[in-house]
Amino acid sequence: MYIESNLSIKNKVTEFIQKVPKAELHIHLEGSIEPETLMRIAERNKINLKYNSVEEVKKAYRFDDLKDFLNIYNQGTKILRTELDFYEITLEYLNKVSTQSVKHVEMFIDFQTYEKRDIKPEIILSGIKAAIADANKKTGITCYLILAFLRQLGAEAALKTFMNALKFKEDIIGIGIAATEIGYPPELFAEVFEAARNEGFRTTAHAGEEGPASYVKGSIDILKVDRIDHGNKAMDDLELIQELIDRQIPLTLCPLSNIALKNVAKLKDHTLKKKLDLGLLVSVNSDDPSYFGGYVNENYQAVASELQLSISDIRKLAENSFVSSFLPDIEKEFHLKTIKDLYEEVIK
Ligand code: HPA
Ligand code: ZN
């Protein structure tokens, strides 16, 4: 009997990861700025960075936890000023992931970071939208936008930013909460989530990245979110896990982010495979790819190697990414069919 070697199976998994259509549902636009781009835009906008070279930027992309990371990430946002800046970083990210067979993206954008510098949402959005249109024309990739509020700025600020953003309703599919988790439990944001749901926005919340399982529970019970970002700590509450399974509430997992921010010690300890086997609707995402050592395919590859994922596991993760998305059913079905066709071709 022919026994396929481990190496040949590994190569097949790698090839399948590269080719399989995927959606990326958890990516912060500013987390995709590569050091080279950061330096180039800073120079163009005559902004003094504390770094003198790309190597120095790369060296600074190290952190001990979420707070430490957010400080460095915020420094990076200071280079952005113009429509062209937002256009270029969006296009660079979309072009990059197109080469990884990513067909659809749901991207977090942020208006609050720019309010104090008086960079208007109009400027941010027009750059981003132009890039999405150009990327779509070139590669067919689609991209929805999720307006994320910074928890540490509080609920009142979130509501104010939301009300101002209502005039861009056509351009924004949903809202979310991100940044500092601990100390800012989901219930603080009940009002803005209710207002958003009433206006027809879809909703997500970062929860259980650093914070406890109760933040995941609060996000689904009080904020009534469609999707949880991260959700790792839900594993501490088995009743909650059962609810997430029964209701098929998606969790957008970000394995390399969890390692970089030390929320998980080693990839071998990551609960992604366990969650997949339990029937949770989990997907693989990059969070902040230029900071955490990889785009979506590097995340798939890392968990595939460390958790010994099979081609059929990868298929399921890719399917989950579309099922968890905010795409219309007809588009979900189209992508699911292309995944099925590719899978059948590969295992023949
Ligand atoms: N976690 C929380 N908030 C964020 C992140 C993250 O990894 N990246 C940008 N905002
Ligand atoms: Zn995130």
Image: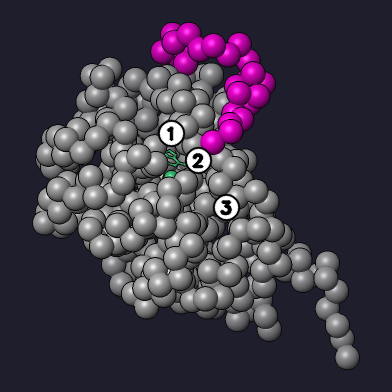
Q: CA distance from mark 2 to mark 3?
A: 11 Å
Of the image marks 2 and 1, the number of the one nearer the N terminus: 1
Circle 1 is placed at which residue position? 30
Circle 2 is placed at which residue position? 288
Of the image marks 2 and 3, the number of the one nearer the N terminus: 3
Q: Is residue 186 left or right of residue 194?
A: right
Kind of element beneath mark 3:
helix
Q: Is residue 343 left or right of residue 159?
A: right
> Are the residues tagged 2 and 1 within 8 Å (C-beta)?
yes
Residue 125 vertical placement versus 286 (above, below):
above
Residue 95 or residue 49, whichever sits in front: 49
Q: CA distance from mark 2 to mark 1?
A: 8 Å
Task: Answer few, some or many: residues within 10 Å of disc 1's Cα (few below 14, many 20 plus, some between 14 and 19).
Answer: many
Q: Residue at x 24, y 24 (%)?
A: 115
Instruction: Please identify the residue farthest to the bottom as the structure is shown.
Output: 1
For ligand 1, tell me if the residue under mark 2 lies within 8 Å: yes
State the image coordinates of residue 194 (x, y, percent, origin top left).
15, 53
Circle 3 is placed at which residue position? 255
**Given the image, on which type of amino acid does mark 1 rest?**
Glu
